[in-house]
Image (cartoon, rainbow, N blue to C red):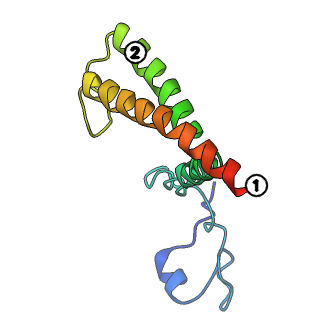
Amino acid sequence: MTSARPDPSSASRGEGVTGEPGELDLSGLNRYDETVGSPAPPFDPLRLCVFTTVALIACVLGPIAVLGFALIAIAGYARARRQGLLRSKCKLGDTRLVLAYLSALAVLAAVATPFWVMFWIGRF
């Protein structure tokens, strides 16, 4: 049985499988090489879309949105803490600090909401 691969000397002369001058053997191109592995997936900026959407909601609803997001986050962190989470990936680290921060934001948003509503009522 003969091999379909050209010898290296014929490849350097520009000869393909048949050995004819000027014929290029392109059969080895565009194949998966297991030794190289798969390329890294492209970066998906989903977080940026989520952040923009949250900012839009906060811009439209003001302190009402902040209060809503803070209450949802407090409920999530309280549940996670009850299930044993003591350290968060949040910059604050300790879940007690995160809960205190979120609670302070919720109180500030609750205090600011009537003023925000009065501001918009006065505009109409």
Q: Is residue 113 left or right of residue 26?
A: left
Q: Is residue 79 left or right of residue 55?
A: left
Q: Residue at x 44, y 31 (%)?
A: 106
Res 24 seen here = yes
Numbered badge on residue 124: 1
Q: Is residue 37 above or below residue 72?
A: below
Q: Is residue 15 left or right of residue 77?
A: right
Q: Is residue 28 above or below residue 13?
A: above
Residue 13 position within the rendered picture, expressed as x and y whole percent measured from the top left: 54, 90
Q: Residue at x 50, y 86 (%)?
A: 12
Q: Residue at x 32, y 36 (%)?
A: 90
Tell us which disc is closer to us: 2 or 1.
Answer: 1
Q: Is residue 11 above or below residue 118?
A: below
Res 62 seen here = no
Q: In terms of image quadrants, where is residue 113? A: top right
Residue 63 position within the rendered picture, expressed as x and y whole percent measured from the top left: 54, 41
Residue furthest out toward the top:
82
What amino acid is found at the position of numbered circle 2 in the picture?
Answer: Ala
Work out whether residue 72 or residue 107 is closer to the camera in this orientation and state it.
107
Q: Give me the C-alpha separation between circle 2 and circle 1.
A: 40 Å
Q: Residues within 10 Å of mark 1 (few under 14, many from 20)?
A: few
Q: Residues within 10 Å of mark 2 (few under 14, many from 20)?
A: some
The residue labelled by disc 2 is 78
Residue 91 position within the rendered picture, expressed as x and y whole percent measured from the top left: 28, 40
What amino acid is found at the position of numbered circle 1 in the picture?
Answer: Phe
Residue 34 position within the rendered picture, expressed as x and y whole percent measured from the top left: 49, 49
Label 1 sits on a secondary structure element that is: loop
Residue furthest out toward the right:
124
Label 2 sits on a secondary structure element that is: helix
How many numbered marks appear?
2
Numbered badge on residue 63: none
